[in-house]
Image (cartoon, grey):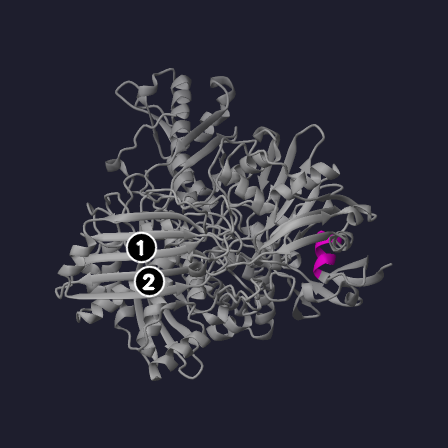
Amino acid sequence: MGVLVQTTVNSDPVEFTCSEDESLLDVLRNRMGLTGAKEGCGTGDCGACSVILDGRLVCSCLVLGAEMNGKRVETIEGMAEGAKLHPLQQHFIDGAALQCGVCTPGFLMAAKALLARNPNPSEEEIRFGLAGNLCRCTGYDKIVRAVQSAAKEMRG
Amino acid sequence: MSIDSMTPDLVKKHFKVIGNRVRRPDGVDKVTGRARYGADYNLPGQLVALVLRSPHAHALIEKIDTSKAEKLAGVKAVITSKDLPDHTQGDRGLLDILENCMARKKALYDGHAVAAVAAIDAATARKALKLINVTYKILPHVTDVDEALKHGAPVIHDHVYTEGLSEKPTRPSNHCKYAEYGHGDVEAGFRDADVVISRSFKTEQTHQGYIEPHSVTASVSPDGTAEMFVCTQGHFVYRNQCAALLGLDANKLRVTASEIGGGFGGKTHIWAEPLALALSRKANRPVKLTMTRDEVFRATGPTSSTSVDVKIGAKKDGTITAAFAELRYHGGCFPGNWAELGAMTSFACYDLKNVKSVAKDAIVNRPKTAAYRAPSAPMAAFAVESVVDEVAKAIGMDPLDFRIKNAAKEGTKSSYGPVYGPIGIGPTLQAAKNHPHMKAPLGKNMGRGVACGFWFNFGGQTCVDVNIAADGTVTVAQGTIDVGGSRASIAMAVAEELGISYENVRSIVADTSSLGHNDMTDGSRGTFSSSMAAIFASRNAVKVLRERAAKMWEISIGEVEWKDGAAHAVGAHHGNRSPLSLKEIAAQAGTTGGPVAGHAEITADGAGVSFGTHIADVEVDLETGRSTVKRYTVIQDAGKALHPSYVEGQYQGGAAQGIGWALNEEYVYGKDGRLQNAGFLDYRIPVCSDLPMIDTQILEIANPHHPYGVRGVGETPIVPPLATLGIAVTNATGVRQTHIPMSPPRVLLSLMSKMK
């Protein structure tokens, strides 16, 4: 038995059947092949599975696939416009804001959601805005700077 | 392999590509979600594997009944230790690895694997685990390092007798190894001292905390070949160990390393890989095994918890006359040499006449200790630097000046034996003294700490191929895993040597069937050793390019020089020829002798030792005991920073891990010997809002044994933070901090003991 779900993922209409207890993260990774969101903990503590759901940042491991009916999901795979990177993506590369990179999709989703709410955040606001995402490699310094420089570029 | 120019005085100093902040080759994949990590690999027809783990800290496994699980529809294989027969031929270390992957007669820690299943989906595999019936006989356990060393403690292995004593003990014990390092006469040194200070310290166990859980996808074919896609710091080592444990020839097992989502030492050890292979072999299907975060905490990593005594004596003029340490570390449930590593590093920063470090390694009922970034050094540095700070204050000397006065230098006989070449401890201390951070005012309830640290760095076996395509573009294949940007650095080195642009060099990590053996990325060796091999491989390719140009010109190779990415004819007869670019030579390769390539296979000796000095300002809330880092500076010698951004990233990341360790992270074991905080909620690593910006200063004191002067940089940054913050909190509170982590309850307790 399963639940039939119609939803929108990165602007594409999508239909899938999933079991009642299947997380959105598992649906994205195992049914749609969208493996950019990562499972770091499965308990909502690391943010590596972050996606934007109807404009709101969520841990996709804590959301059920069955809840997606009629919703709009944005994942890391939809962040660039074709070959053109989003300014956050470009500044993460240029500013060496990633090392192993496994947390990077989650950080980019969180940073995008933050800048949508607050286009000109202070360092403290960035730090609190990204506090739900764990990075073990960088010490966050270059991540904060990359978000600052991307925000500046996006404000024009 | 031919090396044209590799003597210490020929370390290259002027660069076109090296030292720039180029974009990493894996950048776009990693910001778009395209990069494939361990769990992102899938094979047709793959099964889902799950592991059943012991809930007991120490128990005899009397019986495992898997019959019900095997009968469940959709279950394709169930394995226990019986499916992993001992192929180790008396190699006890390898047998320990196997026993850690799957318990044999006893479960040795909470989380120890006892059985595993492969099923058509995760739900079926979960059901199957519940149908496995294990009969345990619970045994007394011990999880504390000092308790484990006491007479009367439960003895975990009856075959372990203390190594390193003059006489073999008559009984087995948990004290697996004894070692001593040092020189001179410490007793005489203490008699000469004006001030002698002794203190005891403890540090708790921490996990590397990589964000990516271990994941492996394995497929064993009935023809005896096998392949494995896995997140690892060393796919060649995984290949060799897994093949040995499964009874396969090494060449039959092809291992492809995924992108690695952090390792820090924790992915230098095999854990679940032999289980995935054994399940695949039994089920005759590909198998994917991904650990949960709970399993990562319970069964992989962690570092040792420690107990350390330090005694230092000094004259009033600031000369250290004697230094002694006894270090007790545990290796988890198997023998290790973690205390020994701690002992070797303990006094490495100083030039000492009389020094002795004693190491006592122990076994406890905790997961097998794994390397964690400069393994064992941070805990030793915490204890030693804290006493160095205290002795300096006792004789009325600035602790930084005291360190500068006693710092090791070129020619110093180190406390662990070797005589140092050019080293950076003195310069990093001096740079700290001159740093504006040291002059910044401190606010209320704030304290500043300074401490230094050391790591050996390793070299090891390394192999690199440089292949030039017909269009003149270049691929460099390295065999060391890229954990933090080394592909960029290796490509830069190749571009530098060939004299072409960085954009024309693509670097990849080759699989185990495509390149010679490479040791793993540990010991800060990845960039050091692979850049060295890449430079030699490129120089060999340049020799081929010169030969081809000579052939095209019909002159001798001695009349061809390589400069700026092109062959130049030299000498009176040929000097007027137009240069032949790499691209032009490559285009003619088919008619001048075939493909152009350069290879290098080396044991990269001469990894330069590394030193760093850190400065931290910490504010302590005296009501709650919570410490907040307000400012942090890392100063470290890199030898030569190939890509400064990634060197800074190592400094910042190591400092952040050290800050987490110093202030918050710890494994909490209950009286039942079970881990109580196996998750990121209760084992809280620093988040973005916990940290300030982390300033860095890169010093470059060339390592004479690398063609560009490179030293490993990755591990040293985690060595000083425990001590730096311990001293900072001490200065903020007026109470000497002796127990890491300095979590709020522990700091409060120390404040209360002061009031008493």
**Hey, which quadrant is residue B754 in on the image?**
bottom left
Where is the N terminus of chain B found, in terms of image quarters? Answer: top left
Q: Which residues are magenta?
A: A25-34
Q: Is residue B661 left or right of residue A89?
A: left
Q: Which residue is mark 1?
A: B346
Amino acid type, label 2: Ala
Give the overall secondary structure of the magenta segment.
helix
Circle 1 SS class = helix
Q: Mark 2 packing: few (<14 Cα in 10 Å), some, or many (20+)?
A: many
Q: Residue A80: which numbered mark, if any?
A: none
Subunit that carries the residue with mark 1: B
Quadrant of residue B565 within the rendered picture: top left
- Judged from the image, the secondary structure of the residue bearing numbered disc 2 is helix
State the residue position of label 2. B383
In the rendered image, residue B112, in percent from the top left (x then y), is placed at: 60, 52
Which residue sits at x=52%, y=30%?
B469
